[in-house]
Image (tube, coloured by chain):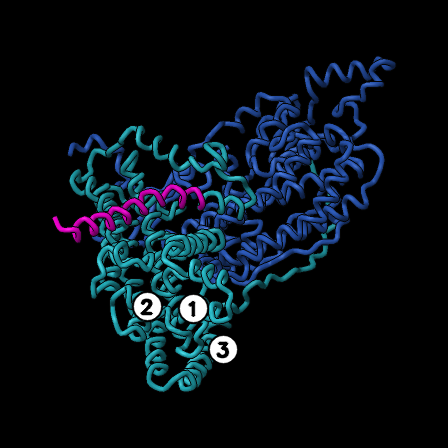
Chain colours: A blue, B cyan
Amino acid sequence: MPESTFMPSTETRFEKIGENTLVVNMGPQHPSTHGVLRVVLELEGETIVNLDVQIGYLHTGMEKEAEYQQYLKCVTMTDRMDYLSANNNNLAHALAVEKLLQIEIPPRGQALRVILAELSRIASHCVWLGTHALDLGAMTPFFWIFAEREKILDMFEMFSGVRMMPSWIVPGGLRGDMPEGFEQALRTFLKQFPSALSDVEALLVTNPIWIGRTRNIGKLTTDQCYALGLSGPIIRGSGEPWDLRKSNPYSGYEKYDFQIPVGQNGDVYDRFLVRLAEMRESVKILQQAIDGLPGGAWSSSDRKVVPPPREELDSSMESLIHHFKLWTEGFHTPVGEAYAAVEGPKGELGWYIVSDGTNTPYRWHVRPSSFMNLQALKPMCIGHLIADVVAIIGSIDIVLGEIDR
Amino acid sequence: MTPEFWWGTLRALIIIAFVLVGVPPVIWWERRLLSWMQDRVGPNRVGPWGLLQPIADGVKLFFKEEVMPAAVDKFVYWLAPAIALFPAFVIGATLVWGPNPMLTPVADVDIGILWVLAISSLGVYGIVLGGWASNNKYSLLGGLRSTAQLVSYELAMGVALYSVLLVTGSLKMTEVVARQQAPLYDVLPWAQNWFILTPYGFGAGVIFLICMIAETNRAPFDLPEAESELIAGFHTEYSSMKFAVFFMGEYAVMAMFGAIFTDLFLGGWSPLPLNWDYLSAQASAAHLGWLSSALSFIGGAWMAPVWFIGKVFFLLTVYIWIRATLPRLRYDQLMNVGWKFLLPFAALNFVLTAVWMLFGWLAFGIAAAVVAAGYLMVVGFVLRPRAFKDAAKVHLVDVQANTAQTIEVQR
């Protein structure tokens, strides 16, 4: 057999530890690496002795591209990073730009942002729950929970006509007000979602096989989490009540009454439970937000950032000029830099923007939660079996679009 | 060419036809039922209710390009699917699917159950060889898992059958079925002594059911193919008709094990655990001629295959139901279940069966109560709390929101 018929060997990736080890290439085309993650495993039997994470198969150069785009046009790129919770990305970007501009958003706009962000969180956790269960061989939760996610996507569609990438949260506020029929749809959803979630939980939470597969797998202590820069459900699963919505509230999160679920052991099972509890907390937040939704404007009244309403264009010369300038040149930000982060479904999701005073960012850097969280894969996996790698990847809840950018 | 020979050939052909014709409906039923359980529709386009979908898939696979990786061991690679399908045809040789001695079983040999155990173990060679010959690491791991699985479950399966054999006193399938047509507990004349209705038979039946799911590589024991870990395990490198043969083999063996379970525990071809002859005689004694003939028709030879297939169908439904419900076990957990749980319980069940045989149901009840108490002691107070300790426990923490946030812009 000529060697040339094979792909370049994965064996060279490691100095092999023992005579009896086997190097297996998992991904980038693998059903359980959630996209195009590549993991090179060195196995002894089925036990992992070494592991190497390879990323970059989905690199799109969005951070560089943003340096050539006006701030408003950057928004559509934020959607495509963590494509499972686009609204949270929009929100983090908008907060960073608003920090640069030093503008305030009226209360209705903030509440609507919270509603969109929390719906996004639930939708993202739905995908996580379905795929995580599917990775461990439980098919049914995937279909049941995706039916719920569909309802959320339908609500996003009401806003923007787009299901996954609404781009509705922009610097300066929102693109528009809450659409007709949304409130009713949301209330119906909030009423039936907890019971639908309970149906899925009944299949998994007390299932001995599920507990056996996830308990004491991929344990992380709080110290390890801090050392690796992990955030989100992973650090909460390890017992640290760290949540940006509480520690650095944004968009009026301090007004809502909700709790932080934390686990005890920091294993896959605890992260699973934390995320389930988070969905219920999100429902609580959504209920409060829709009940106490203030009236008034949904966007900033700063005409340098937010285009004037259509009626004004007919009567006001200034408005016409603002409108023209905004849609051709965009707005200029003051010289400076700003970092704003939100508690995304996967952890701290931040935007760091450096402005040189022009209408495009000088540097547009993302602090993606999945990228940081993925670093924990190696310490978590070593010593476990192949089947556990799949469980651990699922419990990190990565999105490759966000990792590679 | 004696008539014996022709009858034997006919019987063998009936079994082979049963397997070949039975596989597409089984696949269709699995896909449809699974869909309904998962809130979706399933294949419903090809033919009425999508019934022709498996045929269409078969035609598609037949015309697909055959991709053979460069470095495979060609002979073994070709042989493996054949070995995987072979047991499905042969295992049915001792199956009893009706009362007509001319038609069933194909071979009423003295070693009927032994034959089933022996042949069913052969199927794993197809998987191991397929995994080995593909020259793919994932396939190899799948094949290895399959071996470990077989070793862990074959033993418990055999030991579970001891109870049945002990009661029957024979390895002959016909005898096993005949024993189940005796009065229930040898007391109630209107009922049949299906082994699943007896305490020892129920224990053996549950263990056998778990083992047969493992034996046929079905969820939650589908480790050799485990699509989320090993992509497709042993058949990753198989395409076109070779893959189809593996696929058919899996479903055919499923159906065959359903049939074996029916014969061994569900009383063979009887529709309900009722003694139809006895009931028919009672009815004619009560001058209810029509009822008598109806009862003897229901329990008679003509309807036997229908009831038999119905029971197999029910067991296939159980397979699918389990697949829709449970996550997959891990490699080591699977072996733990086999060695530490199923095998001891099968042995215990064997001892209890002997107690029943020797001293009757009262002694059995006392012995079973002692065992159950012991089990509760061990599992209920030692193992279970450990497994479920802190389970489903997440603390909800109230964190005071930090309201003193300021907007900072560095200039």
Tell me how far mark 2 sits from mark 1, CA to CA. 12 Å
Residue that extends furthest to the right in the rendered view of this protein = A315
**Circle 1: residue type:** Asn
Chain where mark 2 sits: B
Element assignment for label 3: helix
Secondary structure of the magenta portion, mostly? helix
Judging by the rendered image, the residue that carries numbered circle 2 is B178
Q: Nearer the viewer, mark 3 or mark 2?
A: 2
2 and 1 marks in contact (CB < 8 Å): no
Query: Which residue is rendered at x = 28% and y = 50% of the image?
Result: B88
Q: Secondary structure at mark 1?
A: loop
List the single residue furthest toward the left. B1
Picture coordinates of residue A107 (x, y %)? Answer: 80, 39
Q: CA distance from mark 3 to mark 1?
A: 43 Å
Q: Nearer the viewer, residue A248 or A345?
A: A345
Image coordinates for residue B81, horizontal then vertical, percent: 24, 43
Q: Quadrant of residue A14?
A: top left
Q: Is residue A324 visible?
A: yes
Q: Residue at x 30, y 35 (%)?
A: B239
Label 3 amino acid?
Answer: Phe
Q: Amino acid at mark 2?
A: Ala
Disc 3 packing (10 Å; few <14; some 14–19; many ≥20): few
Task: Work out whether mark 3 precedes mark 2 in sequence or the reverse, and give the earlier one.
Answer: 2
Does B367 appear above or below B304?
Answer: below
Q: Viewer-proximal residue, B138 or A271?
A: B138
Q: Which residue is identified by label 1? A: B275
Magenta-drawn segment: B1-29
- Indicate whether residue B9 is drawn in magenta: yes
Badge 2 element: helix
The residue pinned by badge 3 equals B381
